[in-house]
Image (cartoon, rainbow, N blue to C red):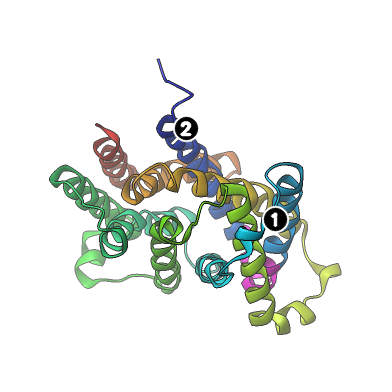
Amino acid sequence: MLDLQSPTVRGHLAMLLFSALVAGSFALGARAANHIEPAALNAVRFFLASVIIGTLVFLGPKVKRRDLSAPWRYFILGGLFAIYFVTMFEGLKTAAPISASAVFTLTPILSAGFGWLLLRQLTTPRMAAALTLAAGGAVWVIFRGNLSAIMAFEIGKGEMIFFVGVIAHALYTPLIKLLNRGESPLVFTFGMMVAGGILLSLYGAKSLIETDVSSLPIIVWITLGYVTVFASAASFFLLQYAALHLKAAKVMAYTYLVPAWVISWEVALGGPMVSASVVAGIAMVIVALLMLLAD
């Protein structure tokens, strides 16, 4: 029986839900990416998510004076997540959702490295083996199970762009623990969302002004609604909560489930089935997840 009162168990459940919600943003994002500039879409989604989280903060823990100390912390974290989301949507203009989600699974091995550099969190031999296995599975999926493509290192432009965002995401996780000064997950998420929205508005001011809202297809509005509520407000809170109770490498281990969830999303949205060789790579990634989570 799971002890649902245990912060550790809740952290794991939070990340399980997080992985499913994140997968939806890949599937929907690929369908909306070429209809609107990433900076414009994400600036709006950050501010809308700030309203949702801000309402929960007002009804719950409230913002205390100490929460406003050192606001630069929120801008660092918000900036990292802004980089992640902008490069994600930019990459999805050319990268397939499953391939992009495989790039995302490289986050744990990078996060483990940043966790050691910033927090001196150690990686056991088993965790190192799991991270290596998962990285191998991710590379296999990124190159679509094509050995000749791997040997020639024929990686797509979209995957390379998104990898920059993955590095930012990996750095974000250990920084949550390093920069948090006792703020509740909701308040900390709210501060980061507002800061990220400000940075994206400045960066994407031109695209925000030039976007013809009336000509945007319905998929853009569906994607905006989803990423605002589920892939922003909800997933950010889940990640903040889990990062305060689990090691950085274990938090990010759940990203290994994202490609499997993306396949489910793609099939549900009428996309094609993936090849057996790609499924084999995803299976390697899931085995790595189980290795990482075993005590």
Tell me if mark 2 has few (under 14), some (14-19) or many (20+) residues whose alpha carbon lies within 10 angstroms of its own. Answer: some
In the image, farthest residue toward the bottom: 206
In the image, farthest residue toward the left: 125
Q: Nearer the viewer, residue 284 or 180?
A: 180
Q: Residue 258, how many percent across, how many down? A: 44, 46
Q: Which mark is residue 119?
A: none
Q: Residue 24, how many percent across, how many down? A: 57, 47
Q: Residue 271, how many percent across, how many down? A: 55, 47
Q: Nearer the viewer, residue 146 or 102?
A: 102
Q: Which residues are magenta?
A: 31-43
Q: Which mark is residue 49?
A: 1
Residue 24 visible somewhere in the drawing: no
Q: Is residue 23 left or right of residue 279?
A: right
- Give me the residue at 32% from left, 50% from top: 249
> Does 60 appear in magenta?
no
Q: Secondary structure at mark 2?
A: helix
The amino acid on which the numbered mark 2 sits, given as a three-letter code, is Arg
The amino acid on which the numbered mark 1 sits, given as a three-letter code, is Ala
Label 2 to label 1: alpha-carbon separation: 23 Å
> Does 34 appear in magenta?
yes
Residue 218 visible somewhere in the drawing: yes
Q: Is residue 131 above or below residue 9?
A: below
Q: Is residue 281 above or below residue 51?
A: above
Q: Is residue 261 left or right of residue 108?
A: right
In the image, farthest residue toward the top: 1
Instruction: Say which label, 2 or 1, has the lower sequence index.
Output: 2
Q: Which residue is mark 2?
A: 10
Magenta segment's dominant SS is: helix
- Give me the residue at 46% from left, 57% from top: 176
